[in-house]
Amino acid sequence: MSLVADLGIAFGRVAFVMLFVLNTAAILGWVERKQSAIMQDRIGANRASIFGIRALGLFHPLADTLKMLTKEDFRPARADKVLFSLAPFVSVVFALVAFASIPFGDTLTIGDRVIPLQAVTLNVGILYVFAMLSLGVYGVMMAGWSSGNNFALLGGQRAAALMISAEIAIGASVMGVIMIYGSLNMMDIARAQGQLLWGWLPKWGIITQPLAFILFLTAGIAATKRIPFDFPEGESEIIGYNVEYSGMKFGMFLMTDMVETTVLAGLCTALFLGGWQVPYLYAEGFHFPWGAELLLSPLAVTVLQVSAFVTKVAVMIFILMLIRWTLPRFRYDQAMKLGWLGLFPLSILNIVLTGALVLAWGAR
Amino acid sequence: MATVTFFVVAVLAVASALGLILKRNPIHGALFLVINLACVAVLYLSLGAEFLAAAQVIVYAGAIMVLFVFAIMVLIPGKEETGPDPRRAVRLLALPVGALLFVQLAMIVRPRDARVPPPPAGGSAESLGTLLFTDYLFPFELTSVLLLAAMVGVLVLARRRPS
């Protein structure tokens, strides 16, 4: 009985994260169209309908998927058979599993069971996310090389160079957060952000590490290969690594971008926006700094925390989309310069400054 | 469970190592090496060394091998890389040297299984960092100096000379 319950709980934790990421990624296609339409004073995609019900164009992702699944799955004659088929899977799998160690809530106690609300509890959770993201580069490189097309190969190399330079800056910028909260465990980091500075200011990462947040966000957007860093595969004018792909294999590369955006929003939330923390909400209820109290049941607290996490991720995605539809595209050399001569040295500077501050204040 | 994991991963590791040696195509070989490194990471994980496993994937599979594959893709192999090896005679040395290495490994591994207890500190980032900055500080700093020297050397070699 207890084994069944344990298995069920483990399955539920994984299923929640998996369904959250997949559904968010699926709906992002709609969000992207509608948000860009609103920003540009258009109506946006609204024609897909089921029995005349249009639901604000919400059926477009469904129509897209059906279209991609039923298209011809073409493979060039000169392509490397195995790698060509493997590349989209490698790309999407590592993006999907990266979310596993991001916590979406504090522990939930049912009976005598204490359930941490994250798919996998890892002591080095933050390193796990970076490991998975860094393996995602192989999908892009394999796609570019195995297509047997020199333009695709060049696109793959541009993508790989961009992702390498971005990931170095991501890793270096997060180092400051790790130093402040003193842990590699993402649950510990989220929990530590519930403390208060000077008795009223939540100790979120964006407040203790503002420079790291900007660097992380910039490098993160670069790692997702989307506008303004979309020179590996500009949709309408640049031939990219996925030029030879069609049907659902092409769709999987598209999906990778959406999943990576979700993972980036989740990471920003967990590291810089307090994770699942609601300001002044503790395990037994609200304790406001001006003395007021509002006691809540543990279940209500958990529901509030999980919805806070989901809301923060949604807001982060909204900001990412705003950036995507506002900025023009970087040239290859400009992006490289930004990565290696801008983001990376500044991240190192941030590490040195944070180290000095931690030493001086004895903060932790 | 742990034994099953070990055997599955061990078979995968040996198979990917064979693939690395036997494949003619350098890209395929490099990708087999990535699988091999990932297998080693899983073995670390099954020993409870989470930090080492993550570092193995990030540093070797995620950074060094990406650069390898990148370099191989840039220098798309022409005939000279894929044709027959001009130094065939050297291959004869492979068998005795390989046998010697195997004997050495066997001698190192054999007496350990009974004698050496698992490391008391475990594989956490804290214990590893403490060890690196106390007991192993000198080799640690020496390695970083070696890497720095290599970097400076590359910069000197790659610098554009005024001609």
Image (cartoon, helix red, strand yellow):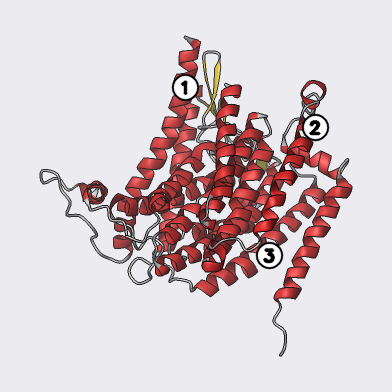
Question: Relative to residue B161, is residue B6 depicted above or below?
Answer: above
Instruction: Determine the residue positioned at 62% across, 57% down.
Output: A168
Give the image location of residue A241, x and y in percent: 41, 62
Residue beneath the point at 65% across and 39% down: B53
Q: Which residue is mark 1?
A: A9
Residue drawn at (48%, 40%) of the image: A97
Q: Amino acid at mark 2?
A: Met
Task: Tell me if residue B94 comes above or below residue A281 in the rendering.
Answer: below
Q: The numbered mark 1 sits on a residue in which chain? A: A
Which type of secondary structure does the marked residue at label 1 adopt? helix
Give the residue number, with chain letter if any, for mark 3.
A345
Q: CA distance from mark 1 to mark 2?
A: 46 Å
Res A181 seen here: yes
Q: Where does label 2 land, which residue?
A: B107
Q: Position of residue A162 (x, y in %)?
A: 53, 63
Q: Is residue A210 visible?
A: no
- Circles 1 and 2 on the same subunit: no
Q: Residue at x 50, y 25 (%)?
A: A296
Pointers 1 and 2 in contact (C-beta within 8 Å): no
Q: Give, as a three-letter code, the residue at label 3.
A: Pro
Q: Earlier in the sequence, mark 1 or mark 3?
A: 1
Q: Are marks 3 and 2 on the same chain?
A: no
The residue furthest left is A51
The chain under label 2 reads B
In depth, the one of A98 and B9 nearer the eye is: B9
Alpha-carbon span between mark 3 and mark 2 = 47 Å
What amino acid is at disc 1?
A: Ile
Residue B65 percent location from the top left of the image: 60, 54
Give B135 or A198, whichever is nearer the viewer: B135
